[in-house]
Structures are given as C-alpha cells and as structure tokens.
C-alpha cells in the first residue's frame, strides 16, 4: 500500500482499477513487479512478440519485389529478430532475474543492442541501430498500445493514471467508465482538473511520480477531497473509504435537494448561477444541478480529435443541441480559444517557443478568418433558437475587440445576403483574462454588453506563473492581492459603464472564494456543473453584508497566505461539511 | 525417427572465411547467413576471434558487426556439418551475399 499526496482538484472518492497511460516516446520507467507476477509478464511478452510478428508478416506480404525488394528485406530482417530465440531469451531472463515488467525488459535489452551497433565504427553497420529502435517501438506498441486504445473502448470502470493528460486524450474518454483521474503533473486549473470537475469525478494532480508507481490494473483510491491517492490499499483502508465515499455521496444528495431553490442570500440578493460546459451533452447536467444557463460554452473541443476543421453545420448542430436544453435562458458561446495548452501543436501550426504569449485564442482567429467566420456564422444561425450570446476570449486591447466585432458585422451582412434570419440584437461580450484588459476595463466596457472575468488566465498572466508547471504552481493563486485588485478594478469599471460582469474561472467554483466575490460586487457566477449545489448552499447561508465585510478586509491584506487562510476560515464557518 | 537421429555420428567441420562484400555483414547478409544456416540440422557457431556466437541467431550474428575484410571462423557440428560448412563458405566468399565487393562498381 502506497499513499501519495497531491493537490485535490475535483471532489469525490473513487475506488477503481487503474488504467495507466503513457505518453508516446515517454521513456518506460523501471517498474518492479513481485516475483509472483513474473509469469504474467512473460506471457505478456509472448503475446507482444506474436502480435508484432503477425503485424510484420502482413506488412512484408504487402510489399512487392519492386525497388529491389529493399523494404521487403527490412521487414524480413525485423521478422528474423522477433523469431530469434536468443533475443527472446535475453528479455525473458531479465524479467526473471530482476522482476521487471515486459516493457522495461524489452526497452532495456533492445536499447543495449542498439547502442552496441551505434558504437561500431563502420557507418553502414552503426546505422542499423535504427532497425533495433524500430523493433523496440513495435514491441512496445504491442505492450502499451492496447491500453491506449482502451481509453476509447472501455468496458469497465477505471481510474486513469497518467503523467499528464492532454485535451486530445480526455476528449477521447468514454466518460461512462472513467471514475477518477490522477496525474503526476498539473495544478488546480490544469486541463485534468477542468475535465474532472465538469464530469463530476474526483481528481488529484501534482502527484510527482505516481504513474511510475502504479501498474495497470492496480486498485487505486482517489480522494479528491483531501488530495490523496492510495495505491493497492489494504482491505481495512478500502472499507474505511467505502464508508467515507457513502457519507460524501449523502452530502451530495442533501445539496441536490436545494436544486429547485433560488440562489438568494439571506438578505435577499439574487445571484445568477450558470454552468461552464465543453460538450453539448453536459448542458443537461447544468440543468439537473440547478444552473440557470450556460455562462461559458468552450468550443475548442469541436476542433480536437479530427483531421479537418468542423463545418458550419457541425458547429450549428452542437450549438442548437445546447441551446434547445435552455430555451430562453442564456447560453454564452465563447469563440474558439485554440492554441497554448488547448491545441496539440500539430503540423499545421509550427510549434511556438512561448505558446502562452503567442498566436492563441482571439489572435489565432483574427489571423484565420475563414475558420473564425465559419464559427460566427453558425452561432448567429443558432441565435434564433434561444438566448445565445457571443463571447470573445483573450482580448488584450481595444483594437482586437473592435476587429472581432467588425468581423461579426461582416458575417451578419453575409447572412443578410443569404437571407438567413438571426438575432440582430445578439449580445456580445469579452473575456477579461489579461492584466491589460483588466486595466483597460473602463474603455472596453463601452464597447460590449458584458464582461466575463476568466480568473485562470488572469491569474497566470498577472503572476507570470505557468499553472501546469508543478515546480512553480504553488505561486499560482487567485487569492493573490495583485489578482484581487485587478478583479476589483474590472467590477467597478463594469458597474460604472453598466456592463454586466460575471466570473467564470475556477475561482468561482471555490467555496472559499465565493463570499469574497459576492462582497466585491459579483452577482453572476459561472462554474463547473457539479459545484453548483455546493456554491448555491453557501450563497443561501450568507448575507451580502457579511460578504462586503469579508471583501473589505481581504482587499486590505498584502499577502496571499493571509488572504487564503482568512477565506478558508470564513467558508468553514458557513459550510463545515465541505472542509 | 528419434532413435535414428541418435545413431547418427557426430561430424565437426571448421573453416575460416573472409567478408568480401563492401558493406560488410550488415542486416541483410546476416539474414541470408542465418536463413541458410537454419536449413541444416547441425549446430553452427561463428567466431571473430573475440566473440563466439550462434550462427542461427540473427541478433548474435549481426552483433558481430563484421566489416569488409573481417575473418570469421565457422564451426559446424552435427550430421550434415560438412554440407553446411560448404554452403556457408560459398555464400560468404563466392556469392558475397549477392552484393558488390569494393572492386566492383555498385549497381544500386
């Protein structure tokens, strides 16, 4: 039994068998096994060899003798290697002698052979190392590849353990079977955290070397409340956790009971609670949890896991599906926020040295007008189905905002020319998520109907901290006085210009921060759907007067630590069960 | 059949050959050597003076990394040892693994 401590990023408890995902090209860590598991590993090795032989036999047969049969020869050589008993014996011996996994043994033996070739003076022979690496990869694909495929074809409940999860990987999950997430890297606002919260499953990140510790199939407990992951728990621990998990679920049911009640403070202030979603099928969950609309519909996922851009019709259908759930309640669609961590730097987009300061988000859209206009066309078309609003992400200056609005007008004219109806008075807003936008809020407010403060990016850009980098992620905090002062500026300027202002970052899902936001004047909050009942419960337990006092006190504080501990204490008084 | 094999006398043959093709004993020639050696019942071992390897294993043969001009000692042991050693010598020294020698113009 191993207990690892990380950062809790999504609440709940899961007890499940693990599925370990290795990123491609990630060096196979030494994974020691128990001597009793050696036979299983040797059987896995045998299967990998016969799988690889089958693959190569088909490849060889498909090559003709043209071009001197050179390619055919390469496959033929690889086949001889895979059938070489002394090679297989070497790998098997290593599994036996050192009690290691098949992956590790394959990698070690073949890399040893490859380095033997590399050291030969003769260039023609030393180049043959490449053949050995190729054989290694083929065997590893056999050993690991099936697991990768498993993500999409899960048949049983699993907890996913990985170094880091990419949006592409999580978009491929069969959500029905994924019960928890645990990653070595990441912070409270990493992609893993966002996905886990939106799915309502527990997640713990920043676990350092967890993925090396866990082998696929090990039982793991993910405690998303306390930030703990337990590998191969003993029976007593499992029993304790089953009990705890049940109690936690009961608290959840209790919170669900307040679903139909309004989000009103004890002294009568009405708060609007909206949901953040990524997929149309999450809209239903927002409604179930008592959300009154969508405050942030992230559309990046439409672009992932596919070779081509989505068509206008595909955009339209996704938006129509979401809007139909809410009828005449607001659905704020954010235009594509691609780039940086949101987009695998594929061949179409040359990798940038500094993607977070690079061509991302609205900048990317303004340089890829066809793509941008396609999306705007679909949003406008869907605007007649309900109360659709458009939101532009990562605005850093007035010019960008004017440009985005101008393009929207262009698309409106296109629709007029095509005689397609749309809502002419569609509301347009921007995300305030850069310090420059926050500082220019009074100017920007005059040009839009609403602001949405994206606290994740605002915090990372203000504090110059990469939220996914575990060695500095402790510096990342929305409770930093610098961030709070910017947020206050935005709210004050928005109020002066009578522009609506909402908060849609992870900060809004944080029970400890809610009272502060209310005290700073926020009346609209958009958050991960599973968090809605808990936040509503807090809102219903406080008065605006209390919140104002908290905000006044906090805004006079000079250190993050002071703010955080003060807010935690304040929240603990209101909803003791959640802490 | 088992009984018949047991009665066969044990023949041992040895020969020294020189790698004459320009690119040496790289993957494809190693494959040819191993394929040919594997057709015989006898054991085939090959030595470059430093290492002694199994002539039926492509991994071991290719790891000899025998370049052009390297001399190898082949030893065959078993009922068809003589046939085997002749065939292998033919492949290395006369056919040059169907590859050009340094003196010849490369055709590829």
Image (spheres, coloured by chain):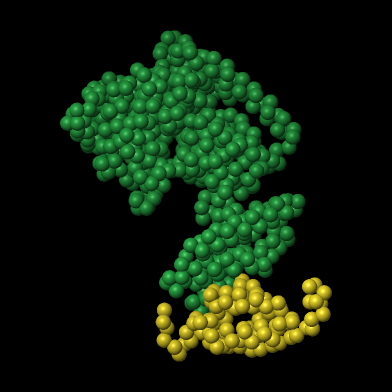
Residue A413 lies in what quarter of the image? top left
Instruction: Residue at 55% x, 78% y: name it.
Output: B29
Q: Can residue A293 be seen at all in this image of the molecule?
A: no
Depth order, front residue of B1/A80? B1
The colour assigned to chain B within the rendered structure: yellow
Provide the letter of the chain coloured green: A
Q: Which residue sits at x=27%, y=28%?
A: A380
Identify which residue is drawn at 22% across, 33% down: A411
Locate residue A45: give its quadrant. Answer: bottom right
Determine whether A166 is above or below A482 in the image. below
Task: Tell me: A281 left or right of B78.
Answer: left
- Image spot of residue A72 (x, y percent): 49, 68
Along the viewing direction, whichever of B100 and A469 lies nearer the viewer: B100
Q: Tell me the quarter of the image containing the C terminus of chain A.
A: top right
Q: What percent of the width, then of the height, locates residue A203?
A: 55, 35
| Left or right of residue A437, residue B50 in this image | right
Extreme top residue here?
Answer: A267
């Amino acid at each position: 039994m191993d207990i690892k401590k990380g950062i809790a990023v999504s609440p709940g408890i899961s007890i499940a068998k693990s599925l370990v995902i290795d990123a491609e090209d990630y060096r196979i860590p030494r994974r020691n096994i128990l001597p009793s598991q050696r036979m299983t590993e040797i059987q896995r090795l045998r299967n990998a060899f016969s799988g690889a032989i089958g693959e190569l036999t088909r490849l060889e047969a498909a090559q003709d003798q043209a071009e001197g049969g050179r390619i055919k020869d390469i496959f033929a050589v690889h086949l001889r290697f895979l059938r070489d008993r002394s090679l297989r014996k070497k790998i098997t011996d290593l599994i036996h002698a050192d009690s290691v996994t098949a992956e590790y043994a394959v990698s070690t033996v073949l890399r040893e052979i490859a380095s033997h070739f590399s050291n030969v003076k003769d260039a023609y022979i030393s180049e043959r190392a490449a053949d050995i690496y190729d054989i290694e990869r083929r065997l590893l694909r056999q050993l690991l590849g099936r697991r990768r495929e498993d993500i999409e074809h899960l048949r049983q409940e699993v907890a996913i353990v990985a170094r880091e999860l990419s949006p592409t990987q999580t978009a491929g999950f069969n959500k029905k079977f994924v019960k928890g997430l645990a990653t070595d890297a990441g912070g409270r606002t990493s992609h893993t955290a966002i996905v886990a919260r939106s799915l309502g499953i527990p997640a713990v990140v920043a676990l350092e070397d967890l993925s090396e510790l866990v082998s696929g199939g090990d039982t793991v407990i993910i405690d998303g409340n306390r930030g703990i992951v337990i590998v191969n728990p003993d029976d007593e621990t499992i029993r304790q956790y089953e009990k705890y998990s049940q109690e936690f679920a009961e608290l959840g049911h209790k919170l669900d009971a307040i679903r139909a009640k309004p989000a009103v403070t004890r002294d009568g202030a009405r708060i609007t609670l909206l949901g953040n979603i990524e997929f149309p099928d999450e809209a239903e969950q927002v409604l179930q949890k008592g959300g009154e609309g969508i405050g942030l519909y992230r559309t990046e996922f439409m672009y992932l896991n596919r070779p081509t851009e989505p068509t206008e019709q595909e955009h339209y259908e996704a938006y129509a599906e979401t809007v139909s759930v809410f009828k005449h309640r607001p659905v704020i669609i954010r235009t594509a926020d691609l780039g940086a961590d949101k987009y695998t730097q594929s061949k179409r987009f040359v990798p940038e040295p500094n993607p977070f300061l690079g061509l991302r988000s609205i900048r990317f859209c303004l340089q890829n007008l066809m793509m941008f206009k396609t999306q705007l066309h679909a949003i406008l078309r869907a605007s007649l189905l309900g109360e659709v609003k458009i939101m532009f992400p990562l605005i850093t200056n007035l010019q960008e905002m004017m440009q985005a609005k101008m393009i929207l007008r262009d698309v409106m004219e296109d629709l007029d020319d095509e005689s397609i109806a749309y809502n002419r008075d569609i509301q347009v807003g921007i995300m305030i998520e850069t310090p420059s936008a926050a500082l220019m809020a009074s100017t920007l407010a005059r040009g839009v109907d609403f602001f949405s403060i994206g606290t994740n990016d605002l915090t990372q850009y203000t504090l110059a901290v990469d939220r996914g980098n575990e060695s500095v992620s402790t510096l990342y905090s929305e409770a930093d006085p610098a961030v709070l002062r910017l947020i206050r500026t935005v709210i004050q300027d928005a109020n002066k210009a009578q522009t609506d202002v909402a908060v849609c970052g992870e900060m809004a899902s944080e029970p400890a921060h809610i009272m502060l936001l209310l005290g700073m004047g926020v009346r609209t909050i958009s958050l991960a759907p599973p968090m809605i009942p808990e936040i509503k419960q807090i809102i219903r337990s406080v008065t605006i007067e209390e919140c104002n006092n908290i905000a006044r006190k906090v805004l006079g504080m000079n250190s993050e630590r002071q703010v955080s501990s003060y807010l935690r204490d304040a929240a603990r008084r209101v909803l003791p069960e959640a802490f | 059949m088992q009984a018949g094999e047991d009665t066969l006398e044990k023949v041992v043959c040895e020969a020294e050959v020189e790698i004459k093709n320009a690119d040496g004993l790289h993957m494809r020639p190693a494959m040819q050597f191993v394929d040919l050696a594997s057709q015989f019942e006898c054991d085939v071992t090959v030595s470059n003076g430093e290492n002694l390897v199994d002539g039926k294993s492509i991994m071991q043969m290719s790891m000899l990394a025998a370049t052009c001009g390297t001399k190898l000692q082949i030893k065959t042991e078993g009922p068809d040892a003589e046939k085997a050693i002749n065939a292998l010598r033919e492949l290395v020294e006369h056919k040059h693994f169907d590859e050009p020698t340094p003196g010849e113009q490369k055709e590829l």
